[in-house]
């Protein structure tokens, strides 16, 4: 059984269809990238999967359970976490506090107001080890809003992976980074998504071909091809629709 | 941990010692007012500072807590209830909590403007009903009662002001500690997270609405406790306690004191109580000064007075605070002169007597010379301030110069 399956998913804003009858299956453990030209609907697709938008039609299942049209927090609790294209962190909280908050629900703290976070040894240890994994230990006391861009992106990723979610969705994780920063970020993503399922949207083809086991190409709200990086590279329809010279460069 | 304990022990000792220092009737009455204001302002900050909910109607929970408390006191007096007066504030708190449970169930769906408008509407609704439902709110005269009724508490009947003070001091300690501890719990931490970014909080598993709702209910509880203490202290509760004026006052306290630090609202509550009692005794223009203080805080000290104090943290940790003593002392002379001459001008304009005595100076109110004199002092002081400010700024930068932060390096 696929960990995530989209059946005939469609979304329109007003009269404009953005996503048209998308079918997609993600197997547990794979690293799947969605590529496509600007405005193809990649981010919208992410918003539909994670509950930010409601569907106009179709169904989304996570481990067999229907998750479409449910609020984001219910979907997140099932073990599906995401990062955002535009950095979306808790600006006034410290880096440490950001990650600790991301761990709270998955560790069963819910809305409790009778336990003190400072006293919870396992919670703080897991926060520490997550920070080490992200390379943010030295910045733990700084307010998240004061970090440099690349560090904020690492924290953004950290908020997604901290809870130990089984399926992680990353929306353009290296957008706006310099080459060396992007390289570090890819190594980080590879490390922290080991033994998990990754679904990502990315523009940078070098990174897509480096990270992904499977690629789906989204053009005008439709998936026109899905397959291994080699198959996508050789696919004529994809080349015509979108890739072309990008591939030659790579 | 130890330093925390010391702070709380210091707080307790201060509460115990204060009435021994300010033992006059006026002193005690101001202290009682302060303790009530501190709880109320801290409860307000659970909404605004901690939870990001701008409320224009927090007096609803304070006022209702007060009305419930005064009705309980009356029931105790008539023997229908045997409740020691010590627990009346808690009963007011439960009242505030229950109302918050009801109102919060729909008002916490959104933060921002929607929440602010709903709070304003609810505030007006209760203020209007207070004049309609006379049996509960007592119309314009309010409801009064007696606090020295019912079973005594180990022989204390709270007839004396000092006894009321220690009752209020007990509750201010309990409430402050509870509100502080709340910020250290998962619900309290997530309140900050939702304040910063409600959307992201939902993607890490938390319903922003529920997080806000919990803070909202807790704020209602503590506002109700403050209201209960008000009822015991003044033995009268009127509709004014739940109107926009009271809601506005608590907003000013929290804001001027500073929303970002736990101690901020305490500073604001103490300062505004002093202004309302001591300064108002000296001049009936005190509301103008309060307004000016608020505007200046919003413009120049967005983190309030506590923010101004905490700004000195880095210099303190670097052991360079003493570098600032001289610049501060020197600059404070023209600053004080400037402020005093402005106050003089305002008071002169307001004075209705022929001669206005200001700081031992007899000023003729109808003579141009008084105006020119104060104006000249203000101008010279302003010039002095302008000349000194670059020097002050330099001293500040020197005291705060940090070794390069790692966050700014590329790595």
Image: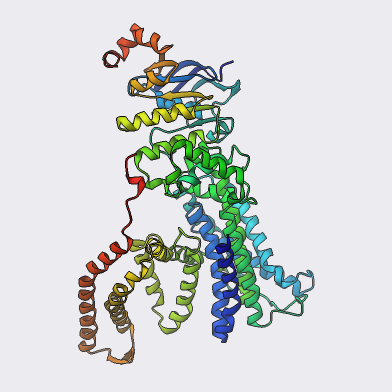
**From where the camera sits, is residue B257 visible?**
yes
Q: Nearer the viewer, residue A82 or A218?
A: A82
Instruction: State left or right for residue B27 relative to residue B225.
Output: left
Relative to B42, is A148 above or below? above
Q: Position of residue A80 (x, y in %)?
A: 54, 29
Camera-side residue of B329 and B351:
B329
State how the image is colored: rainbow
x%, y% of residue B315?
37, 63
Report the side of B392 relative to A151 (left or right): left
Say whether residue B127 is visible.
no
Query: Which residue is rendered at x = 60% and y = 54% of the image?
Result: B217
- Residue sitting at 27 percent across and 13 percent down? A248
Q: Quadrant of the C terminus of chain B?
A: top left
Image quadrant occupied by the N terminus of chain B: bottom right
Within the image, what quadrant is residue A68 found in? top right
Q: Nearer the viewer, residue B261 or B44?
A: B261
Judge by depth and name the residue closer to the eye, B123 or A8.
Answer: A8
Q: Is residue A146 above or below residue A129?
A: below
On the image, the x and y values in percent for residue B107 come to: 54, 49
């Amino acid at each position: 059984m696929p960990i995530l399956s989209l059946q005939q998913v469609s979304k329109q804003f007003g009269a404009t269809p953005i996503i048209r009858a998308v079918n997609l299956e993600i197997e547990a453990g794979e690293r799947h990238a969605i590529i496509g030209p600007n405005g193809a609907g990649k981010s919208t697709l992410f918003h539909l999967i994670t509950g930010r938008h409601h569907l106009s039609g179709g169904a989304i299942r996570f481990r067999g359970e229907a998750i479409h049209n449910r609020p984001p927090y219910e979907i997140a609790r099932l073990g599906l976490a995401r990062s955002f294209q535009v950095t979306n962190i808790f600006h006034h909280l410290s880096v440490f506090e950001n990650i600790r908050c991301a761990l709270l629900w998955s560790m069963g703290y819910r809305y409790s107001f009778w336990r003190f976070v400072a006293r919870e040894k396992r919670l703080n240890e897991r926060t520490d080890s997550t920070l080490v994994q992200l390379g943010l230990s030295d910045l733990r006391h700084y307010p998240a809003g004061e970090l440099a861009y690349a560090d904020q992106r690492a924290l953004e990723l950290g908020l997604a992976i901290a809870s130990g979610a089984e399926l992680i969705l990353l929306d353009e994780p290296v957008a706006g980074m310099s080459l060396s920063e992007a390289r570090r970020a890819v190594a980080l993503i590879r490390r922290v998504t080991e033994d998990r399922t990754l679904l990502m949207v990315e523009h940078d083809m070098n990174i897509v071909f480096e990270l992904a086991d499977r690629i789906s190409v989204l053009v005008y709200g439709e998936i026109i091809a899905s397959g291994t990086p080699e198959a996508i590279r050789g696919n004529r329809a994809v080349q015509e629709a979108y890739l072309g010279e990008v591939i030659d460069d790579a | 941990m130890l330093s925390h304990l010391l702070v709380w022990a210091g707080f307790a000792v201060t509460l115990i010692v204060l009435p021994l220092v300010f033992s006059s009737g006026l002193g005690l009455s101001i202290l009682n007012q302060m303790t009530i204001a501190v709880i109320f302002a801290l409860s307000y900050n659970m909404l605004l500072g901690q939870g990001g909910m701008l409320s224009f109607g927090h007096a609803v929970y304070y006022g209702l807590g007060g009305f419930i408390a005064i009705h309980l006191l009356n029931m105790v007096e008539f023997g229908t209830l045997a409740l020691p007066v010590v627990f009346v504030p808690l009963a007011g708190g439960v009242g505030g909590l229950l109302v918050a449970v009801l109102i919060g169930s729909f008002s916490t769906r959104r933060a921002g403007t929607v929440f602010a408008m709903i709070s304003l509407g609810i505030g007006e609704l209760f203020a209007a009903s207070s004049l309609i439902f006379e049996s509960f709110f007592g119309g314009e005269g309010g409801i009064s009662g007696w606090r020295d009724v019912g079973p005594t508490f180990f022989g204390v009947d709270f007839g004396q002001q000092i006894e009321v003070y220690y009752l209020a001091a007990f509750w201010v300690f309990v409430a402050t500690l509870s509100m502080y501890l709340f910020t250290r719990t998962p619900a309290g931490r997530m309140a900050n997270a939702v304040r910063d970014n409600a959307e992201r909080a939902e993607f890490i598993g938390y319903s922003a609405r529920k997080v806000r709702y919990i803070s909202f209910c807790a704020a209602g509880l503590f506002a109700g406790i403050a209201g209960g203490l008000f009822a015991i202290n003044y033995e009268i509760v009127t509709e004014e306690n739940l109107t926009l004026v009271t809601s506005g006052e608590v907003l000013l306290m929290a804001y001027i004191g500073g929303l970002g630090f736990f101690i901020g609202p305490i500073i604001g509550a103490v300062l505004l109580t002093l202004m309302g009692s001591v300064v108002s005794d000296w001049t009936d223009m005190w509301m103008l000064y309060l307004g000016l203080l608020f505007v200046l805080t919003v413009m120049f000290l967005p983190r309030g007075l506590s923010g101004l104090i905490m700004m000195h943290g880095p210099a303190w940790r670097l052991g360079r605070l003493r570098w600032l003593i001289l610049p501060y002392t020197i600059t404070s002379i023209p600053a004080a002169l400037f402020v005093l001459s402005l106050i003089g001008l305002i008071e002169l304009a307001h004075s209705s007597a022929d001669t206005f005595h200001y700081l031992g100076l007899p000023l003729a109110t109808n003579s141009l010379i008084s105006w020119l004199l104060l104006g000249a002092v203000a101008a010279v002081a302003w010039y002095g301030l302008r000349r000194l400010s670059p020097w002050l700024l330099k001293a500040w930068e020197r005291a705060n110069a940090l070794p390069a932060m790692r966050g700014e390096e590329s790595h």
